[in-house]
Image: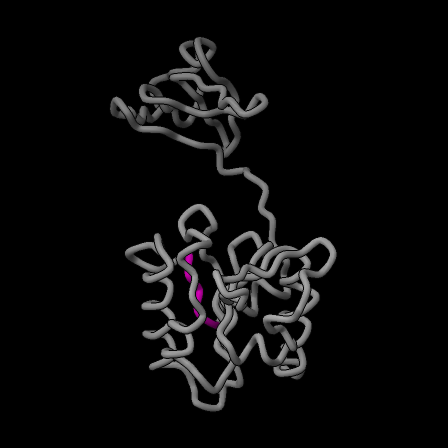
Amino acid sequence: SADVVFRGGTIVTHLSGSQPQSVTKLAVKAGRVVAVGDDVDGLIGDTTRIEELAAGEVAYPGFTDSHTHALCGGFVQERLFLPTKIPPITSFSALVKATAAYVKTMPLAEPAVIGFGWSQSMVSPETVDRALLDEVERDRPVLLMEIAGHSVICNSAALAIANISKDTPDPPGGKIYRDANGEPTGLLEEDATFFTIVMSMLDMFRDEL
């Protein structure tokens, strides 16, 4: 017999394309899934613990793979790690507010303000304004990396380190977002992110990395 049976609710087993496949029963024995669906009924014995899932509750498998760049992942968790912020970051103004709070607590000797984890689905490009980050930190560069690593938002000091100005063309495979006057807003995308800003700031943290 099974050690534990989960039933009721929605139990996601795997993805088929973009659609999750699910069952309403799942049996576990010795730490392993041994049956799903109707096959579970025959494994319920006198010692089986039954976990009833309420209507609307969803259970997911715990053996999901992760995607982590170990060096970067360890580095950014010691800085402004945005995925853990409550309430979550849902706008550029919220991102600026979180950055300001972090700057007040970070060591003065830290050469740059590094943040990670804002989402492009939450922060609209047209709302980004580096002048607002300059108000938070004018002297040290501010570098806020998007959660997938494909974009960054930075202040004027960071742009200056990378020699990005109104006259800088978009690099191949990258984009420098600009305002109505052609000035960089502080939002950089794809190759404008890694090969300009990030690489320009690595020397500041080389001993730590």
Q: Closer to the camera, 30 or 141?
A: 141
Residue positioned 42% across, 27% down in the render: 3
Q: Closer to the camera, 204 or 33?
A: 204
Q: Is residue 146 above or below residue 54?
A: below
Q: Which residues are magenta?
A: 79-83
For the C terminus, give its image quadrant: bottom right
Residue positioned 56% across, 57% down in the render: 151
Q: Is residue 7 above or below residue 104?
A: above
Q: How many marks?
A: 0
Residue positioned 61% across, 65% down in the render: 72
Most distant residue in the bottom direction? 109
For the N terminus, give its image quadrant: top left
Q: Is residue 42 above or below residue 99?
A: above
Q: Position of residue 162 (x, y in %)?
A: 64, 76
Residue positioned 63% across, 70% down in the render: 198
Q: Closer to the camera, 143 or 105?
A: 143
Q: Position of residue 139 (x, y in %)?
A: 47, 87
Most distant residue in the right direction? 172
Residue 60 appears in which quarter of the rendering? top left
Q: Is residue 37 above or below residue 146?
A: above
Q: Position of residue 192 (x, y in %)?
A: 65, 62
Magenta highlight on residue 132: no
Q: Position of residue 22 (x, y in %)?
A: 45, 19
